[in-house]
């Protein structure tokens, strides 16, 4: 066997027990794209006996929204994504909330200044705004980079005594990365292959802000290093940050242990036109959040998959297939099967279009396969709210009878509400077509038959009613449709004899009587 290159060895070692992290910022509820990122990290970790870490990246205090950390944790729990390490589980690299790690970042930022990779910039925001506007007037974009840094108010141009004095006087400042000029950065992304960027197009990003907090870039890279992350699996929107991250690893001298990168494709709107964004929530007629979210400042509620009636297993399944392809025709996967089959190599790089009809189809598949006892319990919650109740056996029978026609438990209620309340009205079109002058008498005869049918179950009832119709030479449609109309109020629905059985003798006969009194042919 040919020997591995050191790079291949490193790769293999990492595959043995990878450490991955999901690193959301608590700046709002997680969008389904965020949950998909968490899921792909989780699947990758479980497949390779690795560790799945939840790190909360809360250094942007201005965009911080209370309640979102709890929302993220609850969303992962609902989806069955177990956190091995991090918030809230803890672990050997705690704390895992970046706001609690401020001192660490300052130390590393200072290290970069000392090694000449960073500098302190004292430019006031209004000065930079002025420069921005001037450039705009020339039809150009201002960038704090190698072309302008020498003329600006920073430690590269000021004497060390001036810098000391300003720092001692608490003059607000930021720390910027000194982006090297004209270097070709080549990175191998697991999903996208080779990514090349020339550093001359990049600006001197802020690493440490005037408020004493690091920016995303510094905190993210430092923590990935300190927490021994082996694979960074995240959304495509972070791809432009990748060259800076690679240069940060290099500047710190951490290139040997730099993680591998995999940037996941965007989730696109159903029409394929553009990215599915948080703002699309409910506008497009389907949820974009895993759970309901109530905006703490406006009180506005955006709907979630859980509250819309999705089963977590269905939600996970549909998310997994947004961007990942198992290489077979199989579409229904349990979490175990996803774990067994998942690989980053089978994630595609073109955007994954969200299809709400397909999402519904997935839920339907899981609903019909679902144990009737679990569905019965969910249905019980709905019927209790409506002021009804029924025993578990009856609820189970109802669920098994109508679930084929539904995708959600609340649709089971819509299909089955007639079991609990008598019809308030009768479908006019069905009356016009099928309610004849002779119908009341026919139904009265059927009612008499029901009086004496023993046992009162679907099988026996079917036999008795059909034999009677045959004997009398009455077409089934002419009898069954009016009978259904009397019991249900509509011309369509599940098996009629099961309906009779579940309604019971007394109620069925009462409904027939009521209908013949109310409906005028
Ligand atoms: N905090 C970033 C986010 O909100 C993390 C991006 C990354 O995974 O590097 O998505």
Image (spheres, grey):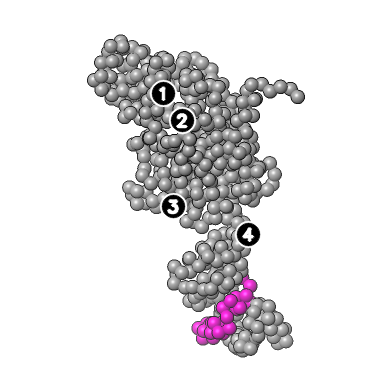
105 left or right, relative to 449: left
- The alpha-carbon separation of the residues under discs 1 and 4 comes to 54 Å
According to the picture, the residue beneath numbered tag 4 turns out to be: 369
According to the picture, the residue beneath numbered tag 1 turns out to be: 108
Asked whether 267 falls inside the magenta stretch, the response is no
Would the CB of label 3 be found within 8 Å of ligand 1? no
First along the sequence among labels 2 and 4 = 2
Magenta part of the protein: which range?
494-521
Towards the viewer: 135 or 282 = 282
Q: How far across and down, in percent of the image, does residue 186 sit?
A: 56, 21
Q: How far across and down, in percent of the image, does residue 46 sit?
A: 59, 41
Q: Residues within 10 Å of mark 4 (few under 14, many from 20)?
A: few
On-image quarter of the N terminus: top right
Q: What's the magenta bit mostly, secondary-structure-wise?
A: helix
Q: Which secondary structure lies at badge 2?
A: helix
Q: Residues within 10 Å of mark 1 (few under 14, many from 20)?
A: some
Q: Residues within 10 Å of mark 3 (few under 14, many from 20)?
A: some
């Amino acid at each position: 066997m040919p020997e591995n290159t050191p790079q291949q060895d490193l790769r293999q070692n990492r595959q043995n027990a990878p450490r991955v992290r999901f690193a959301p910022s608590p700046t709002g509820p997680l969008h389904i794209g965020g949950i998909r990122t968490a899921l792909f990290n989780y699947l990758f970790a479980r497949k390779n006996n690795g560790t799945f870490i939840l790190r909360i990246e809360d250094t942007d205090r201005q965009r911080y929204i209370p309640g979102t950390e709890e929302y993220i944790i609850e969303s992962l729990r609902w989806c069955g994504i177990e956190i091995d390490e991090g918030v809230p589980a803890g672990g050997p690299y705690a704390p895992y909330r970046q706001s609690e790690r401020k001192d660490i970042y300052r130390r590393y930022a200072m290290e970069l200044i000392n090694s000449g990779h960073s500098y302190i910039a004292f430019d006031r925001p209004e000065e930079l705004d002025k420069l921005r506007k001037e450039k705009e007037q020339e039809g150009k974009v201002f960038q704090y980079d190698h072309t302008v840094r020498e003329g600006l108010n920073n430690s590269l141009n000021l004497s060390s005594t001036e810098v000391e004095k300003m720092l001692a006087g608490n003059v607000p400042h930021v720390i910027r990365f000194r982006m090297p000029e004209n270097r070709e950065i080549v990175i191998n992304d697991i999903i996208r292959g080779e990514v090349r960027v020339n550093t001359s197009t990049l600006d001197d990003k802020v690493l440490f802000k005037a408020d004493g907090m690091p920016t995303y870039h510094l905190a993210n890279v430092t923590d990935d290093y300190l927490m021994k992350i082996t694979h960074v699996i995240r959304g495509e929107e972070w791809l432009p940050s990748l060259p800076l991250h690679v240069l940060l690893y290099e500047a710190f001298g951490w290139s040997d242990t730099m993680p591998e990168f995999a940037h996941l494709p965007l989730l696109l709107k159903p029409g394929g036109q553009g990215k599915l964004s948080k703002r699309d929530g409910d506008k497009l007629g389907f949820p974009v959040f895993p759970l309901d979210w109530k905006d703490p400042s406006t009180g506005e509620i955006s709907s979630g998959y859980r509250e819309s009636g999705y089963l977590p297993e269905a939600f996970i399944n549909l998310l997994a297939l947004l961007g990942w392809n198992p290489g077979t025709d199989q579409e229904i996967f349990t979490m175990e099967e996803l774990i067994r089959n998942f690989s980053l190599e089978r994630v595609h790089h073109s955007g994954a279009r969200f299809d709400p009809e397909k999402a519904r189809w997935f839920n339907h598949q899981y609903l019909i396969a679902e144990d009737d006892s679990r569905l019965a319990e969910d249905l019980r919650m709905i019927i209790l709210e409506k002021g009804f109740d029924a025993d578990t056996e009856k609820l189970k029978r109802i669920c098994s009878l109508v679930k084929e026609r539904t995708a959600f438990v609340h649709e089971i209620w819509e299909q089955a509400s007639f079991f609990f309340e008598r019809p308030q009205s009768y479908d006019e079109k069905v009356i016009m077509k099928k309610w004849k002058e002779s119908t009341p008498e026919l139904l009265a005869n059927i009612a008499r038959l029901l009086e004496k049918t023993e046992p009162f179950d679907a099988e026996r009832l079917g036999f008795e009613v059909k034999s009677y119709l045959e004997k009398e030479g009455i077409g089934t449609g002419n009898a069954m449709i009016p009978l259904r109309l009397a019991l249900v109020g509509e011309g369509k629905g599940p098996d009629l004899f099961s309906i009779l059985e579940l309604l019971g003798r007394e109620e069925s006969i009462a409904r027939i009587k009521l209908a013949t009194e109310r409906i005028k042919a």
